Image: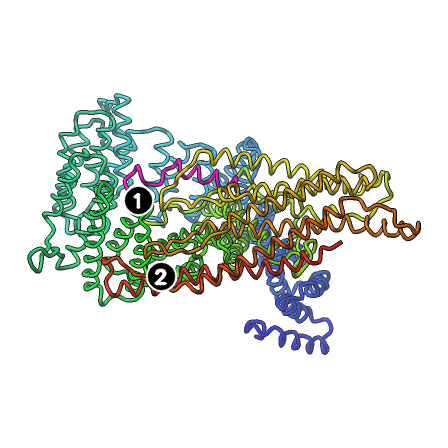
Amino acid sequence: DYLDNGNNKMAIQQADKLLKKHKDLHCAKVLKAIGLQRTGKQDEAYILAQEVAALEPTDDNSLQALTILYREMHRPELVTKLYEAAVKKVPNSEEYHSHLFMAYARVGEYKKMQQAGMALYKIVPKNPYYFWSVMSLIMQSISAQDENLSKTMFLPLAERMVEKMVKEDKIEAEAEVELYYMILERLEKYREALDVVRGKLGEKLTSELQSRENKCMAMYKKLRKWPECNALSRRLLLKNSDDWQFYITYFDSVFQLIDESWTPPLEEEHSLEGEVHYSIEQAVKFIEERITEESKSSRPLRGPYLAKLELIRRLRHRGCNDEHKLGDPEELMFQYFKKFGDKPCCFTDLKVFVDLLPSSQYTKFISQLLEVIPLSATGEGETALPEDIRALQQHLCVVQLSRLLGLYHAMDKKEKLSVVRELMLRYRHGLEFGKSCLKTELQFSDYYCLLAVHLLLDLWLEEGEETAVWQCLTLLEEGLSHSPSNAQFKLLLIRIYCRLGAFEPVAELYSSLDAKHIQHDTIGYLLTRYAEALGHFAAASQSCNFALRFFHSNQKDTSEYIIQAYKYGAFEKIPEFIAFRNRLNSSLHFAQVRTERMLLDLLLEANITTSLEESIKSMSLSPEEDDIPWKDLRDNRDLTVLFNWDPKDRDISEEHRKLSLEEETLWLRIRSLTLRLVSGLPTLSHSIQPKNSEKTAENGVSSKIDTVRSLLQQLEAAVDSGKKFLEQKIQYPVLGPPPTRMAGFFSNGSCQCQTSLFYLVSDIYELDTNGLEDSAEVQERIGNSFKSLIERLTGLFNKCKGDLIEVRDGTLKTHANLLENLVFLVETISITLWVSSYCDSVLRPFKSNLQKKKKKKKESSVAMPPVFTHFLDYVTDLQTLTSNVIDHIKGLEIILTALKLEDLSIKDTLLLQEEKKFTKTVQGKVQSSYHHSIQEIGELLKKRLDTIKKLKI
């Protein structure tokens, strides 16, 4: 009970009391171990658990408790050993055998699962156990590296096992038929699979609607039996003329038959499934009949009307002259709007077919639609407004279509602003209809507000209108106050605040989105891309943790899903779960978050609270190891999460996705190599070896410098690829993928600073191994490196100067790039310090040796090698530079605090009184966010300055 209530200390005390009375009570020991594990004493818990496990317990309580403990330790492989021992002692226990099978399933031991399943079946001949074994064979075939082996050994064996049950008439459940179908499909025995589905066994396929028909259809397609495909889809459409997937199959098969010049046989049936349509005339007639049928139905069906448009699209695509038989697409779309315009889906339905309209007809088409909407104006010259929700939905549909057809894009600035005014008027009027909406429901007119913001975004990004962006934020914040659950408002606010360089409001907005499970991978990039880049280190750390927690729990969770699938016979889901797990493990976002999180931890802690060496050790980082699956990286980002009504040529394209993935991968490579190079620094400091001894090579230290040099070459190559990529000057759409930090990294000089630092490491190492004698050339090189480093850092600092927020003609302008440069400066100074510590660790022993020599010879004539003076000058310059940066940051803080935003003349008369209230809120949020960033950067630099002061050799 104490464990269940989270009172772990009491649980340990109670277990100790019990153990005093009964020394050998296994269960009490394990429960105590669980308590220890949960209070962070992992090692003690493990020792205690192994004591019990070594006795090979067979009582249910101990086994269950140990299973729970091992799961919390993330050591599922120990559970298998536990039950292997239990099964040996109690060989006829059905329960222990099934626990053993599930334990193997958790660790993916498919061969052992197959054996455990058969062993179970021998003890208790139940069908599910037999089929567990069959499924494990399929899993062996899926996971086999050699496809040939999978098709010649595992799958045929699984097929024979099922055939044995079929012959003995022992097939009982639908899951068993599904499994048989799955094996035949993977063996590409489509004809046999079709016979199974159409035969007696197929009668068991009842749990899913049209499961049998769908499987038949899939097999007909594989076998290219187009007559059957056509007849079956035709038959299913007669049953339900609203099922879109069957219209697609129907059209595909009709055109395939036309291309093959197929004609029906004279005497026999057309096909196994009945009558076949094999000409355009028949298809046209069939669709017309569906529409006639639909007019008699009690509720309106969209399928037949859209099918007509789809057929016109296909005929036009093929260059046929028969489309006129179906009517004019413009008229058909108009009729469709009259029938379904009040449904929110009307826009998405028509969006697919707008290509059928000639561009010269766009304006006429929109006017035609507007004429049929019942709008009424209160007075002369007033805007005509809808009187009910139906009319509002219809009008919204037309506005969305206007944006999609590019009518708004063609307007000039003045026209756009007047449309924004009109849309906001309509938005506020529409709020009347949503007075009774709950907080969790969206307002009916929310899209008006979103569309107005899209227009303002055009003005900001295309015409450089600064006031427009503040209006965007104002309108979105207003919209959010009326519709607090609208995710689109929140996502758009996140994107705009980030573009302005304000991260503070974003964290709160993102957490209110309440992202669940897979969304941490699909939309997490919105958060992790900007948190650290804009100087919010604590928030960055937190957002990385959110994502990593999800990715790490995915391993454990997926195992549980797989086990449930076995228990309930949902075999076809098992390969899907495994593919899902693999997809998450090779997620681009997962790799980025892992890398950025480690770099961030080093930035915040290394050589401040703990030494660089300890930090790297605690992360189990090693310069040799690269855990990123470069070849299999999957881009799981949802780049269309923001609603968009842009025409095709302005929308995000496949090309943009590819380029964005390439850019993200290049940047990840640069960051990952930087991290590995930093993790190589502590490995270079070795105990002093006698000079010229061969030991250095054996100790592996010389190979360590080789690793660092090889990584440096790789970094140079990655940087070159990055520069080549940026030469393309790619512009993503406004709401497309955000660009990486790579462009700033190159343009502000951080890149040159960081690479030259790692070259310096190589020189210092050379000095270290060859000693000070005859090293004038290396010393001079090191001296020059120190000088050019300070120059480069000063150059980088100059790129950070300027006002972060300035007031120009009564409007605010933010300079997010200065903030990003400051963060790069802090990162570069940190790396400079880690490298300087290494220099210090090499030069210190040399200096003390020289001083000893001096004392021995009792003369002052032992000359100090120039490298010491170079290093001291360099450290002094570094200290001065860092102090200057800190002073600059203090200055920025003072300016930001003094910036009185309320004095800003919000000169735009567009704003109503209530809007002014939101504008103040928005500007306040941006100001406070910048303030926060500057404080965090300043705090970190002060800590770094203290480290520099310790560097005096």
Measure how far apart labels 1 and 2 are at the Cα level: 22 Å
Residue 751 locus on image (x, y percent): 57, 42
Quarter occupied by the N terminus: bottom right
Q: Amino acid at mark 1?
A: Glu
Quick one: label 2, few (<14), some, or many (20+) residues within 10 Å?
A: many
Q: Mark 1 = which residue?
A: 463
Q: Secondary structure at mark 2?
A: helix
Which quadrant of the figure has residue 211?
top left
Whether residue 936 is situated above or below residue 787 in the rendered picture: below
Q: Which residue is mark 2?
A: 922
Measured as percent of width and height from the top left, residue 666 is found at 52, 39
Would residue 55 be counted in the magenta stretch? no
Depth-wise, is mark 1 or mark 2 nearer the camera?
1
Magenta extent: 646-668
Q: Is 464 situated above or below 493?
A: above
Please state if 450 lies on the left or on the right of 779 as rendered: left
Residue extending furthest toward the left? 380
Q: Which residue is at the front of the view, 941 or 398?
A: 941
Q: Nearer the viewer, residue 423 or 863?
A: 863
